Image (cartoon, helix red, strand yellow):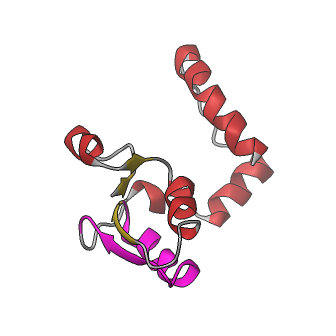
């Protein structure tokens, strides 16, 4: 069972692995063919895995779950933000420092 860290703590505690969407995709796509996975995240991730890893069997932990946060940003929003340098988002310094390592890893990839 692979889940997002945003899942309830009791679900994360029972999972075989916890990570980002890209981590879940990589785990399934790089596993030996014929694997079976329970995926604790949004429906769209399993739909993508059916295309990118058809040799794996993937099951949703919660059927029909659509994450509203994963649907908030669309490519037009990104384009507009880059063109207009807006919106400005101000964050607490401690939060920014805690997020810096994750952002550095994402940029490195």
| Image-quadrant location for residue 93 | top right
Q: Count the numbered circles shown.
A: 0
Residue 58 among magenta residues: yes
Q: How far from the left and from the top, in percent, is residue 95?
A: 53, 21
The answer to whether residue 73 is seen in the rendering is no
Is 81 on the left-hand or right-hand side of 46?
A: right
Is 57 on the left-hand or right-hand side of 28?
A: left
Q: Name the residue furthest left.
A: 10
The answer to whether residue 76 is seen in the rendering is yes
| Image-quadrant location for residue 59 | bottom left
Residue 49 among magenta residues: yes
Q: Quadrant of the N terminus?
A: bottom left
As displayed, is residue 86 above or below residue 52?
Answer: above
Is 97 on the left-hand or right-hand side of 9?
A: right
Q: How far from the left and from the top, in percent, is residue 14?
A: 24, 46
Q: Name the residue furthest top.
A: 94
Q: Report the residue at 68% width, 56% height from top.
A: 78
Is 77 on the left-hand or right-hand side of 79?
A: left
Q: How far from the left and from the top, in percent, is residue 100?
A: 65, 27
As displayed, is residue 97 above or below residue 51?
Answer: above
What segment carries the magenta color? 41-62
Q: Report the residue at 44% width, 79% height from top.
A: 34
Q: How far from the left and from the top, in percent, is residue 106?
A: 68, 44
Q: Report the residue at 35% width, 50% height from top.
A: 16
As displayed, is residue 28 above or below residue 19?
Answer: below
């Amino acid at each position: 069972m692979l889940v997002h860290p945003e899942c309830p703590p009791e679900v994360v505690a029972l999972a075989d692995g916890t990570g980002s969407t890209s981590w879940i995709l990589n785990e399934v796509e790089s596993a030996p063919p014929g694997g079976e996975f329970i995926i604790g995240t949004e429906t769209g991730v399993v739909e993508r895995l059916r295309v990118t890893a058809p040799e794996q069997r993937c099951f949703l932990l919660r059927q029909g779950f659509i994450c509203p946060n994963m649907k908030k940003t669309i490519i037009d929003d990104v384009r507009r933000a880059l063109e207009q340098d807006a919106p400005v988002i101000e964050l607490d310094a401690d939060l920014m420092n805690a997020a810096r390592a994750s952002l550095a890893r994402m940029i490195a990839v």
